[in-house]
Image (cartoon, coloured by chain):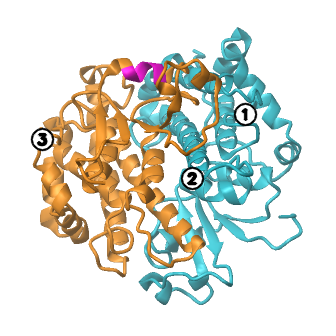
Chain colours: A orange, B cyan
Amino acid sequence: MSSSSSPKYTLHYWPGLPGRGEYVRLAFEATDTPYVDDTDVKNIMPLTSGGVASPPHFAVPILEIPASSGSKRIKTQASQSAPEGAINSAYISQTSAILAYLAPKLGLAGDVDGEGEEEREIRRAHIDQLVLTSMDLCSEAHDTHHPIASSLYYEDQLQESKHRAQIFRAERVPKFMKHFNTVLSSNIAKSHRLVGSTTTTADLAFFQSLEGIKFAFPRLLKAMETSGTYPEVFEFHKSLASEEKLSAYLGSDRRRKFTNGIFRHYPELDGES
Amino acid sequence: MSSSSSPKYTLHYWPGLPGRGEYVRLAFEATDTPYVDDTDVKNIMPLTSGGVASPPHFAVPILEIPASSGSKRIKTQASQSAPEGAINSAYISQTSAILAYLAPKLGLAGDVDGEGEEEREIRRAHIDQLVLTSMDLCSEAHDTHHPIASSLYYEDQLQESKHRAQIFRAERVPKFMKHFNTVLSSNIAKSHRLVGSTTTTADLAFFQSLEGIKFAFPRLLKAMETSGTYPEVFEFHKSLASEEKLSAYLGSDRRRKFTNGIFRHYPELDGES
């Protein structure tokens, strides 16, 4: 797992944006797992059209996993007609499906030595459920600036965006914040982590959504932090950001800045008139 | 797993609507797995507030799993203060997390005797990814009639709904249909199933989203069927609906009718002027 070893995983995602790819990147970075960060659009298209991957993918992020030499892989029509070299790779898409696959392999599933199978499965389901809720927050944040359609310009849905964002700030963000604050406060490990005592993909996913809304709605989040209503959430954020590997990543050039992607800062959507 | 045995699982969901609970119900019904269909709102509230379940849940559906006598369960602060009887249950929420947990237990994960661990994990990830894409279709269908906020009346976001629905019909539904048609046509098992040759939770989830948009947008779906552009999707629908257990369920009183829930039929959103 050292950075010097040859990367096993390739992450395919759009260039220039953190986006949903960043949720996967954090899993690699937090565990010092080498990976190829592929942003060549030419490599993405065939994976969505049914030419190479089976099943074909709806959208990025897409994780590529080379077959390990000893493993058997089902031959598919797609793999038979795939270009040389691609035949041995498997591909997974949908952020939370990728994270559920990677979590146990990267030590982000909270595994405990000697625990029972059922106990492990239920904890993994809890991690999955918390990742999914963080991804819902991500999608809802996106829809504040594109409530009508992703294919239209923001400027052409500005009034609708203002309306949606107002309710997002007043109702939805507080609901998510209260939820995660309660999850954190009801974790008897008192670890500033969502599940158990170690960092899991649930923590990384919530961290990234929180970073996103801090960027997009700085005024709202500042008010929330000052209010003291969700103390566990802000303690969690501080604690996770100071983890050695994550902290190094967050300060590096590899960490992409938020820009005009899923999370966008428009002052008028953050309640500034 | 016969219907006469005592139910192991309890599904907590709102009364009167199929909603996201129906995606879980289909997994039970397609496999003749007994379950308790609990729609008592009084039982839901404590599960979201941190009083009983650890972690607390953001929303329904919530699956309740009693601890099997031999299994060890981590004691949590919540379980220590829970009412007598609740202490032995585990709870999972988020539809796709519930389905990922249940799939292998109900024979809906496409398991093949003698296959390798890695092969099985990747197939499960593919099933998960396809479930998630079907749930995205479900969420987008919902947002056609509530593009601004779920907490506002439809009538108060009618113009925005018409606009969002128009683009949903013209761009999004075709994109989803094309995707699933390609997934079906690239499955070398030629089974009218999304993954491999047996029915999985991926099939059930896509089936339910397809049923939902057929209800909400009958005009659009009729035109799509007649066009012959997505033949595999409509073959899939027919094939799955005629599976013995599913067919019996779909014709029973237990199958809830679509009404004013996630999927709604408003003629003006289906392109009727």
Q: For mark 2, does the 10 Å Cα neighbourhood hold few (<14), some (14 to 19), or many (20 or more) residues?
A: many
Q: Amino acid at mark 3?
A: Glu
**Marks 1/2: CA–CA distance:** 20 Å
Q: Position of residue A34 (x, y in %)?
A: 29, 46
Q: Is residue B202 above or below residue B167?
A: below
Residue type beneath disc 2: Thr
Q: Chain of mark 3?
A: A
Are the residues flagged by discs 3 and 1 from a single subunit? no
The image position of residue B85, as x and y in percent, is 63, 86
Q: Which residue is mark 1?
A: B193
Residue B96 covered by magenta stretch: no
| Mark closer to the chain start, 1 or 2 | 2
How far apart marks 3 and 2 lie (CA) works out to 36 Å
Percent of width and height locating residue A44: 40, 23
Residue located beneath label 2 in the image: B95
Closer to the observer: label 3 or label 1? 1
Residue B67: tell me if it is visible: yes
Q: Secondary structure at mark 3?
A: loop
**SS label for mark 1:** loop
Q: Residues within 10 Å of mark 3 (few under 14, many from 20)?
A: few
Q: Is residue B227 left or right of residue B72?
A: right
Q: Is residue A229 visible?
A: no
User: Mark on residue A272?
Assistant: 3
Magenta segment range? A43-47
Say few, some or many: other residues with alpha carbon within 10 Å of mark 1 (under 14 / 14 to 19 / 20 or more). Answer: many
Q: Residue at x 68, y 68 (%)?
A: B10
Per the image, label 2 sits on a secondary structure element best described as: helix
Using the image as rendered, state which of residue B41 and residue A53 is in the foreground: A53
